[in-house]
Image: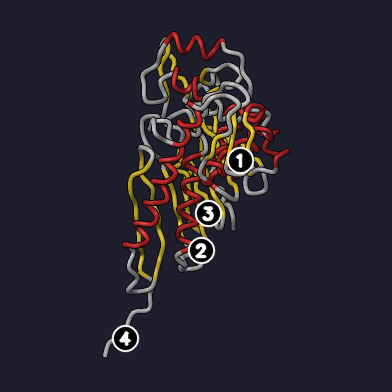
Amino acid sequence: MSKMSTEPVRHALNGPTMGTRWSALFFAPLGFDPDLVQAALQAAVDTVDAQMSTWRPDSDLMRLNAAPVGAWQDIPSDLARVLTIGLAIGRASGGAFDIGQGDAVRAWGFGPAAADPQAILGAMQAPHRAAHDVLELDGNRVRKMAPIALDLNGIAKGYGVDRLAEVLSSCGILDALVGIDGEMRAMGLRPDGNSWTIAVEAPDRDRRAPHSILTLQDAAVATSGDYRHWVTVQGRALSHTMDPARGAPLLAPPASVTVIAPTCAEADAWATALMVKGVEAGADLARKAGLDALFLSRDDAGGVHGIGVGKLFSSKSAATAPAVGD
């Protein structure tokens, strides 16, 4: 009589969200039905999109954007959590991460509509107040103290990854790897006891290839870069990451910044903040904030060089294959 297999079965689930796809990789006992988990994961990211999308006029975020200044607005708990995280990192980064860049993002063509020269001029000339100086939060309600257009593209995907992890945990799945468009969160370990392996992408606009390899356990990773979404102005490719001080894309950002953090929302937001700060100032900020970060920059010959900050990265390992989270 053959023995019944006790080996866990690999499940790789995925679905659409936020213009890309989410993924969840985990192992479960034989006979486990993944259909209910698939539905719960899809519902979680659908909720995030419904609340935080700037591409959906009926989202809770767009309703908040349209609300009058000074009026308290009730908002869902997920949106309140993301605003709280975003405002905290905005303060901690000195405004380098700013969720109040909605007008600039849309003006430059990174929203639902094409770039608008008049709107670009308006975004660059408008006086700027950071979102953490304009928004007032009180539990699940918020009010704007001055006109502002919010955009959560620098944190919503990361938060969506965290929601995927929370759903799996609620289903009793404590070891998994979840992600949305390269933002990843590792839960526990693989069945063989090893950490989860994740590639840091090389900053190449023409192809997808790994630059280095991370091993993660109970941590999240996010990368902000200039090589996937950009606009071309007078023959120059400009990153989708906005400079809050100018209301315009960054002029000379690092090729990419990768951040390791306890949650993916934090990693996502901090990666954007460090892109805005640049390599030197960003590395200083990462050290002060106690972050683990990898800055990749291109040289004149087209080579890529890495600078690592934090105990999980080092300048030597950042250029090859750092091991993180062991």
Kindly check if marks 1 and 3 are in contact, taking CB atoms under 8 A apart as contact.
no
Image depth: mark 2 or mark 1 in front: 1
Task: Check disc 2 and give the amino acid type.
Answer: Leu
Q: Quadrant of residue 3?
A: bottom left
Q: First in sequence, mark 3 or 4: give its number.
A: 4
Q: CA distance from mark 1 to mark 3?
A: 29 Å
- From the image, tell me which residue sits under label 3: 215
Q: CA distance from mark 2 to mark 1?
A: 30 Å
The N terminus is located in which quarter?
bottom left
Does the CB distance between marks 2 and 1 fall below 8 Å? no
Instruction: State the residue lying farthest toward the right.
Output: 288
Question: Mark 4 falls on what kind of element?
Answer: loop
- Sequence order check, earlier mark of 4 and 1: 4
Q: Looking at the image, which is closer to me, 51 or 192?
A: 51
Q: Is residue 129 left or right of residue 36?
A: right
Q: Is residue 29 above or below residue 197?
A: below
**Is residue 66 in sight in this rendering?**
yes
Q: Secondary structure at mark 3?
A: strand
Q: Earlier in the sequence, mark 2 or mark 1?
A: 1
Find disc 2 in the rendering and name its residue: 189
Q: Which residue is mark 1?
A: 84
Compared to residue 241, the image places residue 266 above or below, namely below
4 or 1: mark nearer the eye: 1
Is the Cβ of the residue at disc 2 closer than 8 Å to that at disc 3?
no
Q: Residue 36: where, in percent of width, then height?
A: 34, 62
Q: Residue at x 42, y 46 (%)?
A: 47
Query: Mark 4 highlights which residue?
Result: 3
Residue at the extreme bottom? 1
Alpha carbon separation for disc pair 4 and 1: 53 Å
Where is residue 37? Give x, y as percent. 37, 61
